[in-house]
Image (cartoon, grey):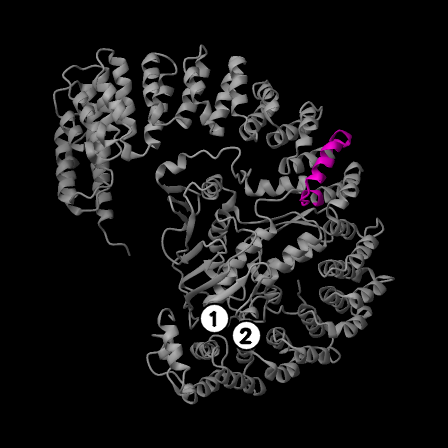
Amino acid sequence: MLARPDVDAVCITTPDFWHAVIAVAAAEAGKDMYCEKPLANSIGEGRAVVNAVNRYGRVFQTGSHERSRSNARYACELVRNGRIGKLHTIHVNLPLDHYDLNLNVGPMPVPEGFDYDMWLGPRPWATYTELRCHFFFRFILDYSGGEVTDRGAHIIDLGQLGNATDRSGPQTVSGWGEFPREGLFNTAKKFEFQFTYANGVKMICKSEGTRGVKFEGSDGWVFIHIHGGNLEAEPASLLKEIIGPNEEHLGRSPGHHRDFLNNVKLRGECFAPPEVGHRSASMCHLANIAMKLGRELKWDPEKEIFTNDSEANNLLMPSLRAPWRV
Amino acid sequence: MYRDSETRNRRAFWGPALHTVLAVSLALLAGSAFAAEPPPLEDALKQIATYEFGQNREMLSVVEDYCRLSYAAPETRSIVEEGLISLLKSDATYDCKDFVCRQLCVIGSDKSVPVLGNMLTDEKLSNIARYALEGIEGKAADKAFIKALGKTSGKVQIGIINSLGARGSEESVRALAKLLDSSDPAVAQAAAAALGHIGGVDAAKAIADARAGAAAEVKQALDDGYLLCAAKAASTGRIDDSMAIYSALNNPAEAKQTQLAAIQGIASVQGPDAAPMLIGLLKGDDPKLQAIAAGALRKMEAPVVFSALAGELPNLGPQAQLLALYILRQHPDAAAKDPISALTKSEVADVRIAAIEALGSNGDASSIPLLAEIATGTDAEAAKYASSSLDTLPGDVDVAFVELAKSASAPVRGELIRSMAVRGAVSAVPYLLESALDADSAVRTHAFDALGALGSAEQLSALMDLLVKMNGNEAQTAAENAIVAVVQKSDPATQPAAPVIATLQGMKGKADVRASFVRVLGRTGDASALPILRECANAKKGDAVKDAAIRALADWPTAETLADLQALASGAGSDTNKALAFRGFMRLLRLPADRPMEETLRLYGEAFKIAASPDDKRLVLAGLAEIKDARALSLVEPLLSDEAVKAEAAQAAEQIKKNTTPQQ
């Protein structure tokens, strides 16, 4: 498909761990891309995607469609224009659905007609069992990052947008996670982690509460519900505020998919460009790394390395199974 | 699991008694992870040697704990690493070795390199060895990869090549260069990619040499490797080297995506200096070159680029104009206003629309008449974008909006007033108050809408005066809306409804006007208005005021008016008033409340007594059907034999039973 000259753009809707390999190959083939979130399954792979897209001058939309909702953008404009006073804390609520993450399963024969080796692609070989694939891949760290990278990629993304750090990242990350010690799955089933940013803002993420993001400032707060973008605020009159033309505007999306198509035609930047998608996914991966190691990590968002823990740096980019590369 | 106690316990565990570390219970560290004392490391390692997928992986977790928690204890960490290495040397299962390599990926040191290096040439183990070895810093790991390179082929060799590329191993350039002409195209492709990631003069030269006469299936990989070398050269200050590569690849004879990437690269390196070249491409007729040029121009930061682009707008074809207008919309420039304004009259519809949109960020006060004219014109599509551009026009232009509105036609006045509201033009409020008395009813309505958005408590008095004057006018509802909006957005501590209450209290005659004020107070939901609303609702005289007050109580946002409505519904008012009150009573009874269930059931019982018609009874039954208490059945059962509502009663009874049946 990538070799076809009559294909201008591709849509990448594979499990997370395939995103980067496909995206880099698509960029090299000169295709524009709509890629589901999280942008990649590791920070290193994400950076490779950004570099490839920039190298080939491609248009790229990350599937972080929550940031295309007008309500969410309005809420972030309230924050960025100081309507809640000085922003100090961002609360991200990521309650898990009720899946049994301790489920014990054994080897199964690979179904006839299913190219399982291809499904595994760039990830280490692993014995087939049905729940490894399909929807539940998202609870295995080789392939995804659990709730943290699933809805976290949406909600943390909005936190980054409201904090005006969506092309950068935090300076520290710390937290704890309760990881299953048996069974197939190994993503955190309960967690609490937090980031601190250079501007002094803290982002606190918990596996509880009403799903969404709350921006707390010195003069009030605003909460964005996921999914749907409904807003709450204190004082409630905040939601009647007008953002004037000379204030900071974040624009309004014609729809996340339409935005992509428009920019394919007009060569502009989508609402969720690769750098933004990468940075939001990176937040999720940073959290998982910090929780797995159980240590506070210092992060250099410019160089994208940990500055206090060389071992943590070894988790930024997994070796990809041959012949795959980014 | 490791939350608060971890730091304290780690200190206790990895402290002075280091020699006993492997025998100490991990339970101290891991909280409740173990019911009994966990095995020492040696035993845990022994147990995982036979691990296969599907078996209990608790012992894997124990070993992982040892790896993680020995971070701050180098001597212990060394013991853990040696234990893992011994497993790799043993006949442990593949799944065990896979697990071990994942741990060594994090904690591995030079000590792990020999055993991992040996695994690299094993077809089955090579990938997991790479998993660990790729992240181990230092030349020892590089040497292990390079050594294995010559002993392998096919996928195994490709994996090793990829690892060398990922590591940026400069030591491997010579070996990788030899593989560029491998008979296995996949190997050659991998070598090209690896050399690109490593970069440097030697890698670039190797790729350049290989590109001459390269097989078609390797060409793209070589091109990408070359582009990577160019980017690396630029990022390390070797601008001339970078430009030499990009210039060579900016050639129509190259694959299109390669040429486009080269143009992108030139733009990245040269910045604004590349603008003339990029604008030249926009003027050309190759859509792909136009597209890459537009994308590159958009990423420029220098204003001079956008001034130049604006100057060229009249000289571009329609497609290039669209691209340029999109860029200028995001990068406004003072020089762009006039050429963009001219394009709002383009013969090409898409260009006209794009120009109107771009004027929203590039225009100034002088653009208001043009945009207002389009916004009120006959082209609906253009009007929509012009309205939007009026709303976003930058700068201090509020005064210009007002000045134009004063002399404009009614449609333009209305449009400008609408836009003032969206723009938050608070300084226009005095004009808006005047416009609320405009001769044109549409303008009056726009003015009240804007006053609702922009007004504050300071304007309440004026708004109430206007409301009085609007009596019977088409704009009366808009006037009421404006007052409600102002009260609702005011700080409750300032008692914003008080002036409205006072005005209503002092108002004589004019029932329609007083009814209007009653409606306003009802919609504010301000509890301080309740006494006067109750007074009006219970007035002996049945007029518009009483009607409005009962409706206000019936539509009240909380259950605070429940008793009022019950009394009104069972009182001596007109049938209409009683019906209004009854429906309000039933609505409020169904709202969430913290009163005891006994009280709720009592009120439903009272409702049945008041219910005057089968429809009223159906309302009561609908409410009862939501009750999650079996006692509600006793209220429903008597109606099961009421011919008029027995079907609804049966449904309600069934629903109550469902509500009170425990879920499976």
Q: What secondary structure prevails in the magenta region?
A: helix
Quarter holding the N terminus of chain B?
A: bottom left
What amino acid is at disc 2? Answer: Val
User: Residue B106 shows which numbered tag?
Assistant: 2
Residue at the spot of label 1:
A293
- Give the residue drawn at x 80%, y 70%: B177
What amino acid is at disc 1? Answer: Leu
Secondary structure under tag 2 reads: helix
Above or below residue B138? Residue A110 is above
- Left or right of B239 in this view: B395: left
Secondary structure under tag 1 reads: helix
Label 1 environment density (alpha carbons within 10 Å; few <14, some 14–19, many ≥20): many
Range covered by the magenta-colored residues: B296-319
- Left or right of B495 in this view: A133: right
Chain letter of disc 2?
A: B
Above or below residue B424? Residue A215 is below
Label 2 environment density (alpha carbons within 10 Å; few <14, some 14–19, many ≥20): many
Judged from this view, the residue extending furthest toward the right is B213
